[in-house]
Amino acid sequence: MRAMTYDRYGDNDVLGLTEQPRPKVGPGEVLVAVRAASVNPVDWKLMSGALDALMDVRFPVVPGWDVAGVVEEVGIDTPEVAVGDEVIAYARKDYVHGGTFAELVTVPVRAVAPKPASVDWEEAAGLPLAGLTALQCLERVGTGPGDVVLIHGAGGGVGSFGVQIARALGARVIGTASADQHNRIRDLGAEPVAYGDGEVAAIKELAPEGVHVVADFVGGTLDVTREVAAEGARVVSIADPDVIGAGGQWVWVRPDGQGLARLASMVDDGAVRVDVEQTFLLEELPEAFARSQEGHVRGKLAVRVAAD
């Protein structure tokens, strides 16, 4: 099969299009013919070696954890799915090796959910990792009706899902982002606030009694959070372990087919949309990583692997 791989840590120039063996399909797994995948910053951070202390790596690595595709083969004891099913998954495994920037990928069946019927392959591929990250963070701190939620980094891939999911859970949302993102954030359902000078004052003006939930998707926001949080506020971060010492929770997203199915239903119901800024071909993955590394991506970067 065709796959983008790297055989050592490094920059984008270590990526190359190679031929790899067809993956073996173990018990409790499905083999997915990949239609599309999407880029997340963790993909190139892993490739750089920055997360070597955290995760085992087996070279050559096929990077990628987001996938949308069609079930081509099932392993033993997988009654949940059948050959031909259209599925999505956050396909992270226990070690880094066989990822989704390839024509075929194996995925534990517990991580698989039906593809939202209302979106195309590229949009579907942009949902799993970022969408589940936002959902798990907001559910971990019990977000619900009546809450005022502050989302740091509301314009990014995770943040834009966070805005929409928090709204779907019944909350009012304030979102911080650069000024050029404000129209988009407003369209998603949040009240935008610019980063930097005046940020605290602007949040206090919108929520004078303080915010009830803070979801930090960028890091470096604890000082602002302390200034604007109401007494007893629940705080969660994916980017700053220091949040633990401040009474908050630090979250690393887990594969979860059931949670992903709930997200897919939100998409089909119109409560959540997936914004795709740009789509690349499989062999253009180095360019896709470079775009992600520039920052300020409006939504998701998709990678088209195969046509329908």
Image (cartoon, grey):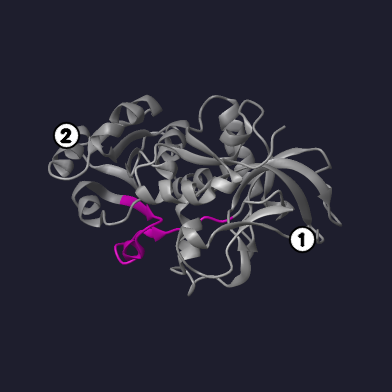
Q: Which residue occupies the foreground of this view, 238 or 156?
A: 156
- The amino acid beneath tag 2 is Glu
- Indicate whether residue 260 is drawn in magenta: no
Residue at the spot 21% in from the left edge and 43% down from the top edge? 195
Up the image or down, 294 lies above or below 42; here it is: above
Q: Residue at label 2?
A: 205
Three-letter amino acid code at disc 1? Pro
At mark 2, the secondary structure is helix
Residue identifier under label 1: 21
The circle drawn on residue 177 is none
| Range shown magenta | 233-254
Of labels 2 and 1, the one closer to you:
1
Q: Is residue 235 magenta?
A: yes
Q: Kindly state the secondary structure of the residue where label 1 is placed.
A: loop
State yes or no: discs 2 and 1 in contact (Cβ < 8 Å): no
Residue 92: quadrant of the picture: bottom right
Query: Left or right: where does residue 293 sit relative to residue 106?
Result: left
The front one of 50 and 103 is 103
